Amino acid sequence: MKAIEVNGSGLDQLRITERLDPTPKKDEILVHWHATSLNFHDYLVAIGGIPVPENRVPMSDGAGEIIAIGEEVDQWKVGDKVMSMFFPNWIEGTPTFNKTRFISGETVDGFITEKSCVAASAVTAIPKGYSYAEAATLPCAALTAWRGLVTEGSLKAGETVLIEGTGGMSIFGLQIAKATGATVVATTSSEEKAARLKAMGASAVVNYKTDERWGKTIFKMTGGGVDHVLDVGGGSTMVQSIEAAKIGGSIISIGILGNGRKGQITFPKLFFKHLRLKGIAVDCRLSQEAMIRAIDVAGFKPVIDRSFGFDELADAFRYQETGKHFGKIVLEW
């Protein structure tokens, strides 16, 4: 069977290899994977920004079909369609070191492979009517947005949500917010993308390239700030996220896009706005199952910008580097 491995730093070091077909242990399932999707985390693994052992199979998202089960597995059957978990050991409850030390595509092998064995508890069903490619967009980006708005934010109808940019997590944030009955404000640097955001239900879009103080602009246009901010830039966006938030609002720190590894925080604004600032990384299986139930009711589908083939992983990452995508980039085979 084919798999892609990381051997060194840089996209040119991604290698297609042949591996023996695995056999599931008594508590495992064997999955024939059909699709994965790109996340910034996967990109960092591929270029060496997150060091991984030699021959690591990258990609934290996967969707496929169960083709064999271990003798003690009773919750799945051959033919079931499943999707992966970013943290395969985090089943429920609050995060701990032991629950989160195994990360798909980083500390354990990921899903740019034709087949692999995983614990029966390390997958969930996919939403009704979803293709493998659509399901493969959910385990990282969608679940992160779900946790930020629903699990942590307790989002309510009538509240206001700020999403930043048009990457996969942000677009899922827009869809989840609209399905909940919230108002969405967005930022982007492209007028074309702004039009698409409005077509999806964003009530207002601010161009962060032409308006460097976009946080204050959003604070004014919303009549006192937004209830929830999904901050994807870290140090590069946090000051403006604080400006955009209402008094008593919530900021969920999710990413470090751009040059966001380090930055400044306007502490007086953080204090006197009485803001809740929390960093998160994806979520557990219980939340993934809750998100799937909500998707089944709401019926929304992911926005897939472009699809690549199995052997085009490096090309897909190069396309991701351009920042031209709107929504998710997938690979399917």
Image (cartoon, rainbow, N blue to C red):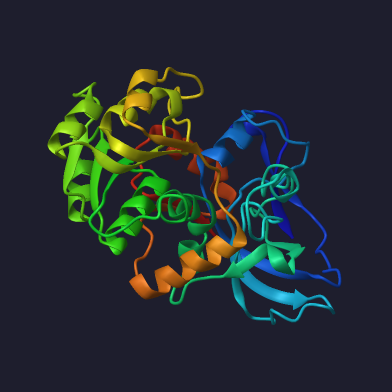
Q: Quadrant of the C terminus?
A: bottom right
Across and down, in percent, residue 224 comes to: 18, 36
Between residue 194 and residue 152, name the one nearer to us: 152
**Residue at the image point whose x is 78% and y is 36% from the top:** 54
- Residue 302 visible: yes
Between residue 29 and residue 333, name the one nearer to us: 29
Between residue 51 and residue 235, name the one nearer to us: 235
The quadrant where residue 35 appears: bottom right
Total numbered badges shown on the rendered structure: 0
Q: Is residue 192 left or right of residue 301?
A: left
**Residue at the image point whose x is 38% and y is 53% from the top:** 172
Across and down, in percent, residue 228 comes to: 33, 44
**Residue at the image point whose x is 71% and y is 50% from the top:** 99
The quadrant where residue 323 appears: top left
Across and down, in percent, residue 265 comes to: 41, 20
Between residue 91 and residue 6, name the one nearer to us: 91
Q: Is residue 21 left or right of residue 316?
A: right
